[in-house]
């Protein structure tokens, strides 16, 4: 019997600083109910979906920073989302900023995503590994990219779990540009990767890339899907948020690398596709049959070296 999971990529338009978590959750509930009408099994919400994407500006005050983080999940504000999803029998993926306890009464901050099953149970958690940008404030830039300042590097690896009838993994935003993330999950037989993103249209560090933003967004997710024989669902927080334009282009991508469905707006929009997880096998068993074709003995540099080192001059 085919293993079909109907997935709703729940793109969200901007969330301004003045908006509350309650307002964001109200919008999610509307998308969730539409997903129910369209017979979705799983709804994928974006990265840091409860607030404006605060790494785009500098804050020094610890209390102000912490106000963007969740200390529990579900929290008071997100409980209605869990309850409604449970009532409707739909699973969901949610990205949020997580404040976790640290050693000796300290705290740790992560850019986190969870996967929630149809019964409302958190079945997997992921903490973002590839934090883009810098850790220092750059006043010459029109906006900041301070993920290295606000978050620690994720410490949970790239887990793949049995859920929704298949093998499901998560990554977050910038991770989608790094082939290692897909392959580590490919090596766990992943069949569905879900991810959210907040991607500015303008890159203050490399403005020459700006006109290729949409192309690169599709390129990395399509390549990751094909090379690992997996579905990839990438979901944006899109549009002009706090004066910063962000990409839309939320996509559901097949293991062939083809885009099955894609958003057409920069606002709240549900993109739906029925994904037959059995389609993964025709890639995993042939051109990307890892057991038959991979040569890890030739890949040692990937884990032994971080930065590129050019060959010595002869
Ligand atoms: N939130 C992100 O990780 N954004 C990065 C931007 C800053 C390049 C991205 O890769 O989309």
Image: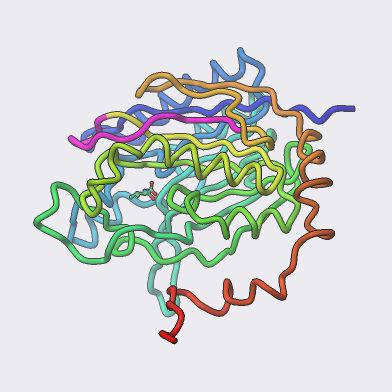
> Is the residue 127 above or below the residue 9 in the image?
below
Residue extending farthest to the left is 140
Q: In the figure, is residue 217 to the left or right of 298? A: left
Q: Which span is picked out in magenta? A: 240-253
Residue beneath the point at 50% across and 56% down: 178
Q: Dividing the picture into quarters, in which one does residue 2 lie?
A: top right
Q: Residue furthest front?
A: 314
Q: Which x, y percent locates residue 240?
A: 25, 30
27 relative position to 255: left or right: left
Q: Residue at x 43, y 77 (%)?
A: 310
Q: Residue at x 40, y 51 (%)?
A: 97
The residue under the point 51% across, 37% down is: 234
Q: Position of residue 109 (x, y in %)?
A: 39, 62
Residue 49 highlighted magenta (yes or no): no
* Residue 282 coordinates in the image, percent (x, y): 81, 38
**Residue 108 in the figure: left or right of residue 206:** right
Q: Quadrant of the rendered structure where residue 226 is?
A: top right
Q: Position of residue 111 (x, y in %)?
A: 43, 54
- Front-lying residue, 258 or 155: 258
């Amino acid at each position: 019997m085919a293993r079909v999971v109907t997935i709703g990529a729940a793109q969200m338009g901007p969330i301004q600083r003045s908006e509350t978590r309650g307002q964001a959750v109200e919008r999610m509930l509307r998308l969730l109910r539409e997903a129910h009408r369209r017979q979705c099994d799983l709804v994928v919400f974006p990265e840091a979906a409860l607030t404006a994407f605060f790494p785009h500006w500098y804050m020094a005050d610890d209390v102000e920073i912490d106000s963007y983080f969740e200390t529990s999940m579900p929290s008071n504000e997100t409980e209605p989302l869990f309850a409604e999803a449970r009532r409707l029998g739909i699973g969901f993926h949610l990205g949020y900023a997580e404040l976790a306890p640290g050693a000796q009464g300290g705290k740790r901050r992560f850019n986190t995503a969870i996967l929630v099953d149809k019964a409302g149970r958190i079945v997997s958690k992921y903490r973002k590994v590839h934090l883009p940008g810098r850790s220092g404030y750059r006043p010459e830039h029109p906006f900041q990219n301070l993920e290295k300042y606000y978050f620690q590097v994720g410490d949970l690896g790239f887990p793949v779990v049995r859920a929704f009838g298949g093998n499901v993994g998560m990554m977050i935003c910038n991770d989608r540009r790094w082939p290692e993330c897909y392959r580590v999950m490919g090596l766990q037989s992943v069949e569905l990767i879900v991810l959210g993103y907040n991607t500015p249209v303008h890159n203050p560090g490399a403005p020459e890339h700006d006109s290729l933003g949409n192309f690169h967004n599709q390129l990395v997710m399509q390549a990751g899907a094909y090379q690992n024989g997996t579905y990839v669902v990438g979901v944006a927080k899109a549009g002009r948020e706090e004066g910063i334009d962000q990409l839309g282009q939320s996509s559901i991508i097949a293991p062939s690398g083809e885009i099955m469905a894609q958003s057409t707006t920069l606002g709240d929009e549900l993109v739906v596709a029925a994904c037959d997880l059995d389609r993964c096998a025709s890639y995993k068993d042939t051109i990307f049959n890892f057991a038959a074709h991979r040569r890890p003995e030739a890949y040692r540099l990937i884990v032994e070296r971080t930065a590129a080192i050019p060959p010595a001059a002869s």
